[in-house]
Image: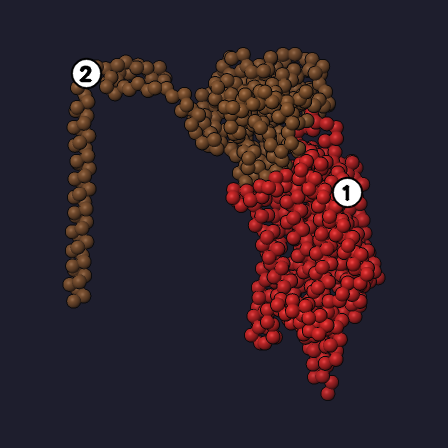
Amino acid sequence: MEKSNKNSRRKFLDKGLKIGLATAIGGIGLSKLTSKLNAKTNSNSIDTMELMTTDGKLIQVDSSEVMEVEHNKEHDKKYNVREGMPNKKFVMVVDLAKCTNKLKCQESCNKNHYITGDNAWLKVYNMQESEKEAPYWMPTLCQHCDKPACVTVCPVDATFKRKDGLVLIDSERCIGCRFCMAACPYSVRVFNWSEPAQGEMSEITMHTDMAEHTPSPEYAGMPSIKGTVDKCDFCPHQIHKNELPHCVSACPNDVFSFGDMYEDAVTNGSGQTVVLSKLLEERAGYKLLESLGTEPSVFYLPPVDRLDDFEEGLGNYNEFQSVKKPE
Amino acid sequence: MNIHKKIISDLAPKKFGGLDTIWTGFLIVVIIVGIIAYIDQLIKGQEVTNMRDYALWGIYISNFVFFVATSFVGTVTVAILRLTNNSWRTPLVRIAEIISVAAIVMAGITIMIDMARPDRLLNLFLHARLQSPITWDVVIIPTYIVISLLLLYFPLLPDFAILKKYFKSKNPRHSRWYGRLSLNWTGSKVQKALQEKSIRIIAIMIIPIGLLLQTIDAWLFSTTYRIGWDSTNFAPYFISGALVAGIGALVAVIYVVRRYKKLENYITDFHFDKLGKLLVLACLIYLYFNINEYVIPLFTSKKGELIHLETLFTGSYAPLFWSVTIIGLIVPIIILLFKKGRKPLPMFYVGLIVVIGSWWKRFVIVTPTLLHPFLPIQGVPESWHHYFPSLHEWLITIATLAMALLIITVLVRYLPVIPIQRTIDELDLINDKDKNTEP
């Protein structure tokens, strides 16, 4: 009894397998056939087209295969704010040889981000490592590290790292523990200790802008919220408009260049675009506090062959000057 | 059996006297003032503190670290002394557990005071990220609160049953409450076995959790790049510091409780002597880790490290640093090494000094580091280069300390501060032994 039972089970399995295999093969064959049939109906035209590939080669393509794509401008903006713009990796280069502490970058940043606290997001440091070393002016902003210490320690994912390189803050979620500020070795994070006074400052500008603007991590300072952290956002709102970040375009000396690492190109305030890798190689680019392993997205070019003497900048230098307050 | 009655009437909670009422009233006033200051902080924002973008953490955080450290006393006395069979702990454990509960509850509250958006507290659960040391704290602090409460509660069960009987005619209302809390304790064999097993499990559990609590507290700092915090020595440094703070607090509280509850027959010079030895051991271990933390970096003297150490040794924080090190650590060691130093009264002063030293020690750990970032402090008002707490911060912080003292006061008022049942059992055991050896 047991034996026959086993046998019948084996038979059943055997049959089942065979039938299954047959249907699978048949299915594949059928689909191949239909695809061939479809192709035949399409390849009636004999027209070909000449096209150029991105690396400059001419190729011939059947014109029936070419479809016109309507360029959708909205397409670029349709991505997850927390994931970032697809296929981009934003970088900045700061040329220390050109900085003469004109502070136009800071002014523009303050104005456009409605910064009214005492601590600006973009600072120009008066740097001198030691007595015998040359002093220089060093603009710093958020370094948008690839291994951001601030993001690691945030308990609620309020500050986050995107695929396009940006480190942003969701100030609707921030709990105000300030751990990210303690973690950041570049001291670029600023806290809203009280209700930010930006409302009165720019009531008109804010309101007109706000009509088409909902608060987003992509536009820091719009608005700043009491008890949360703020910092440089690399201006994704400018990138959307196909414009450079405020500091880049405001600098009269072209200290800043901004661009996409995948394109290997950066553009300065005057609109000159250069190859990033070449620039970094020729000018010996480096990153701030590289030994910490934070892997910043901001490169610095050492202050050699300076545009102007360091002393030129001292005219503008104050131990402390408060951000321009609303009238 | 008369002796049992005497023990019970000695150890049963007593009504507040005049002084106790004044003390409690004083604490309540201090707490109310603190609450008003906190409400003001909620309305105006953290602007009312003297914290700013560089000194971004202040005494709220150092006070939090102090509370966490003090709460370690429960782990030490109950668990470690229990596991090492140090029977002299009996009259001390209850008070240690009470301090532990008060401190850890206040630690949880203090950390929320530092949060600028307490209205978004739920985000810590809704959007929790495991990689953040704050999330570890969110897990470990409630765990420690629960375990500390259980460790306080389980050994109380037989005492509650005794008190229920004791207060039956004297105060029926209290008697009913003690009865409810005793969970129908009859002292049967099954109950005793169950209770003993539960206590054993918790006493063992509290060791890794207590150690983890201190460790996570240290990791809050050592997971950053900051010079002075970025140290692999930090976790054991904090654990040994917690030993000192906890035992110091225990000594001070025990002295006061013994004096006002007239427990000189139960907590004797012998106990203070033992506690003194434990405290000096803790201080020596802490001194060892202090040397690791502050002396060894001098040898490589990396630039940032040197600036940091110079501010502590000779700079603006030198008076505070040397006070907490010499008065708060070295002087207690010297006093406690002598037998006379381990008498109750000198011990009380040593305990007090150690606790105050421990509090300021945390200030020295938190603040100076923040004022030495990697890039120089520039472009901010002069006042941002320094930090000293504002009036709001002091009022709120003092209120949290008062709240901890109030919790201790209330628990000491309503709970038998010395385990009654265990004292009776131990006495019986001794008497039995005497009887057996007499003939």
Q: In front: B58, or B76?
A: B58
Q: From the image, tell me which residue sits under label 1.
A: B321
Residue A86 position in % (x across, y down)? 43, 27
Q: In front: A12, or B282?
A: A12
Q: Name the residue at 68% across, 67% down.
A: B174
Check disc 1: other Cα within 10 Å, few if <14, some if 14-19, many if 20+: many
| Above or below: residue A90 compared with residue B285 | above
Q: Which disc, if any, is residue B74?
A: none
The answer for which chain carries disc 2 is A
Residue at far bottom of view: B439
Q: Name the residue at 73% across, 87% down.
A: B439
Residue B111 visible, this angle: yes
The answer for which chain carries disc 1 is B
Which of labels 2 and 1 is toward the front? 2
Q: In front: B100, or B185?
A: B185
Residue B398 position in % (x across, y down)? 75, 47
| Above or below: residue B4 compared with residue A22 | below
Residue B96 position in % (x across, y down)? 70, 60
Look at the image and give the colour of chain B. red
Q: What element carries label 1?
A: helix
Query: In the rendered structure, which amino acid carries the disc numbered 1?
Result: Phe
Question: What chain is the brown one?
Answer: A
Q: From the image, tell me which residue sits under label 2.
A: A46
Check disc 2: other Cα within 10 Å, few if <14, some if 14-19, many if 20+: few
The type of colouring in the image is: by chain
Q: Name the residue at 82% across, 55% down.
A: B349
Instruction: Name which quarter of the figure residue A306 lies in.
Output: top right
